Amino acid sequence: MSSTVDLAPQELRTLVAVAEEGGFSAAAVRLGTSQSAVSHAVRGIERKLGVVLFDRGRYGARPTAAGARAVAHGRRVLRMLDLLVRETRAAEPHDVAGPLRIAAFRSAALHLLPPVLERLTARHPAIEPTVTVVREIGPGTAGEVAEGRADLGIATFGTSSPIPPHLVGDVLLEEPYALVHPAGHPAPRSLPLVDWRENCSSYTRTWWAAQDWIPTATVRAEDDGAVLSMVGSGLGMAIMPALSLTRAPHGLEITDLGPDRPTRRIGYVTTPELATTAVVRALVRELRSHAKPQVSAV
């Protein structure tokens, strides 16, 4: 088999449609063609690549491991083709326009991105940002970028969600953890621990293990907002990063954990090719301007 394989953009769109729609018929509706045309196109792509891309069954079509890789690459190639057209047609080199897809974990989407996007769109009104909230567990926001579903991800670094080696990024800020508890409680460290799964991946493990006053979590919540609500209702105390405590509701008290407190690094990740595009560079400039002081690069 030749080492050079030419795939047309429409073939890539077909791969992505089948993967995202879960079958040939639904992909055909999305693409405005017939089921047989989609099936024929996929077989042709598989012949070109020499691998099976989809497991066919009575319940639809699911990407194989090779298919998942092909779909991720396909999304990224199609995005770059779109940016090629937009940036080539721009009247001036500094004209920045078009969609900007951002993946962020909940507290970053709520508290970090709004002022950044406000300044970004004031400076570049033709940018159309969309933000998808992604739990920072497993692949997390970096996985959305790697899979071609986002142009840039706001990610936590140094956690159980590793940054894929083929992405690039930078640390924007380092935030401390603090103890949050019902206001006025005489012994907040004696309260049960309220926690949420996403937070567990962000702890500084050495610090956490050395704290004999921290009990095993007895109350679990879905996200940091639910944790704050439970703590405010007197159900326990929590150890949370600063971003999650932005505009904490009344009835809560935030106590510093001292000079040895744990911290969490927050930064951005993108692909090497997207990092050079005008729309991503514009967002990164605003993120760096907003997040001060900065710390060392990834």
Image (spheres, rainbow, N blue to C red):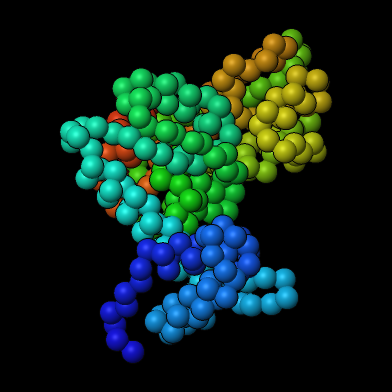
Q: Is residue 97 left or right of residue 11?
A: left
Q: Nearer the viewer, residue 251 or 206?
A: 251
Q: Is residue 100 left or right of residue 285?
A: right
Position of the C terminus, as image quadrant, is top left
Residue 117 position, x and y percent, is 42, 26
State the residue lying farthest toward the bottom. 1
Q: Residue at x 71, y 29 (%)?
A: 227
Residue 204 visible in image: yes
Quadrant in the picture for residue 39: bottom right
Q: Is residue 208 above or below residue 252?
A: below
Q: Nearer the viewer, residue 293 or 63?
A: 63
Q: Is residue 241 left or right of residue 280?
A: right
Q: Residue at x 59, y 71 (%)?
A: 35
Q: Is residue 157 above or below residue 242?
A: below
Q: Residue at x 48, y 75 (%)?
A: 41
Q: Residue at x 31, y 22 (%)?
A: 123
State the residue lying farthest toward the left. 92
Q: Is residue 89 above or below residue 69?
A: above
Residue 213 position, x and y percent, is 70, 33
Residue 171 visible in image: no
Position of the N terminus, as image quadrant, is bottom left
Residue 229 position, x and y percent, is 74, 24
Q: Is residue 250 left or right of residue 287?
A: right
